[in-house]
Image (tube, helix red, strand yellow):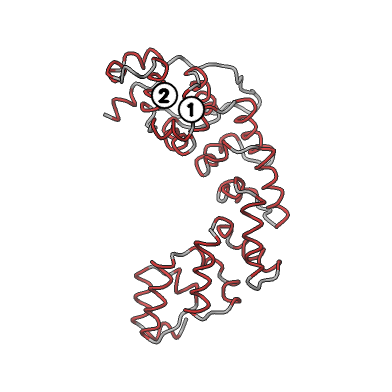
């Protein structure tokens, strides 16, 4: 069924060609209409008669792209009043920026607000930000957007630029790393997310420079919940493992591991065997490596 639906899409399954930098894209260009395809699809004739003609078109358009229409309409009520032409224009624009058709279900499923975004004032500025502020070439737009679709629904002036400015002040100088590995940091609120995480690390005993150093070594710290991650893992580290803050400064990746599935089971296993391992080795080793370490005490002693 999914293959049959996909075959009715107006978008080509082939990889789109990226526009040349020297040839600016005409944002007003409209793609070929997909209404004929929708109207001829067998699902169109059996749709609930109570649903308006225009709504049928949008629902089928979303479903044909592999997007759950009910969820999309719930997350983005503006889709109800958006014209099919405007939705087509957004799809066409995204493909003109190098996004593949088979990327769209995931991207738009996660962020259906994109479908009703204004191309000139909301979407295009994001790609300009990627190019001008992060030095992302056009042929790499897709890689960044796939990593973090939320970039497309973030205000450049109110969110992306302030976040980049703050991160650069902290010492995030590798723009490639920000763009391709940690773009989620760019869509995080400076005031409500980034600053509170840094202050929490300072509040437990680290100097500001030490806290910043930990975050630079493990940027994912900025994405963890204080209440659901930092506090319970810190509590177990101090009361269960009886570790020192210096250990976490050297290995901040501790907070990236599951407390119940990784940290506790491995620590308990070591305690029961009367063994000790450096924190990083205890957590980073694979299950096979860990088993070998605990069954061969001499190898543990030589670590």
Using the image as rendered, state which of residue 67 and residue 228 is in the foreground. Answer: 228
Residue 303 position in % (x across, y down)? 47, 81
Residue at x-position 58% and y-position 26%: 19
Residue 281 position in % (x across, y down)? 47, 73
Mark number displayed over residue 84: none
On screen, residue 83 versus residue 289, left or right, reads right
The quadrant in which residue 38 appears is top left
Residue 155 position in % (x across, y down)? 64, 37
Name above or below for residue 219 compared with residue 260. Answer: above
Count the numbered circles shown.
2
Q: Residues within 10 Å of mark 2 (few under 14, many from 20)?
A: some
Residue 275 position in % (x across, y down)? 41, 85
Q: Quadrant of the N terminus?
A: top left
Residue on which disc 1 sits? 16
User: What kind of element bears circle 2?
Assistant: loop
Residue on which disc 2 sits? 12
User: What kind of element bears circle 1?
Assistant: loop
Using the image as rendered, state which of residue 164 and residue 24 is in the foreground. Answer: 164
Name above or below for residue 282 compared with residue 64. Answer: below
Residue at x-position 36% and y-position 26%: 64
Dot 2 and dot 1 residues touching (CB under 8 Å): yes
Tell me the CA gap for discs 2 and 1. Answer: 8 Å
Residue at x-position 56% and y-position 67%: 252
Q: Residues within 10 Å of mark 1 (few under 14, many from 20)?
A: some
On screen, residue 24 versus residue 285, left or right, reads right
């Amino acid at each position: 069924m999914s293959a049959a639906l996909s075959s009715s899409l107006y978008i080509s399954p082939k990889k789109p060609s990226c526009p040349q930098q020297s040839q600016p894209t005409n944002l007003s260009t409209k793609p070929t209409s997909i209404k004929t395809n929708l109207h001829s699809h067998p699902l169109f004739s059996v749709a609930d008669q109570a649903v308006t003609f225009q709504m049928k078109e949008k629902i089928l358009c979303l479903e044909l792209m592999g997007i759950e229409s009910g969820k999309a309409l719930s997350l983005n009520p503006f889709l109800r009043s958006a014209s099919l032409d405007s939705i087509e224009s957004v799809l066409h624009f995204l493909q003109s920026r190098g996004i593949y058709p088979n990327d769209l279900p995931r991207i738009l499923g996660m962020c259906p607000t994109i479908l009703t975004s204004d191309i000139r004032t909301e979407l295009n500025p994001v790609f300009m930000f990627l190019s001008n502020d992060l030095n992302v070439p056009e042929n790499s737009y897709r890689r960044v957007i796939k990593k973090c679709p939320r970039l497309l629904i973030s205000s450049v002036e109110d969110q992306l630029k302030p976040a980049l400015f703050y991160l650069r002040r902290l010492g995030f100088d590798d723009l490639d790393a920000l763009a391709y590995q940690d773009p989620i940091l760019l869509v995080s609120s400076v005031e409500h997310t980034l600053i509170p995480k840094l202050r929490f690390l300072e509040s437990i005993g680290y100097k500001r420079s030490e806290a910043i150093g930990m975050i630079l070594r493990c940027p994912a710290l900025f994405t963890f919940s204080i209440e659901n991650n930092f506090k319970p893992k810190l509590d177990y580290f101090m009361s269960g493992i009886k570790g020192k803050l210096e250990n976490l400064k050297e290995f901040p990746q501790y907070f990236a591991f599951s407390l119940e599935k990784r940290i506790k089971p491995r620590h308990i296993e070591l305690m029961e065997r009367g063994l000790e391992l450096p924190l990083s080795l205890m957590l980073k080793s694979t299950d096979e490596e860990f088993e070998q370490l605990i069954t061969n005490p001499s190898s543990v002693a030589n670590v």
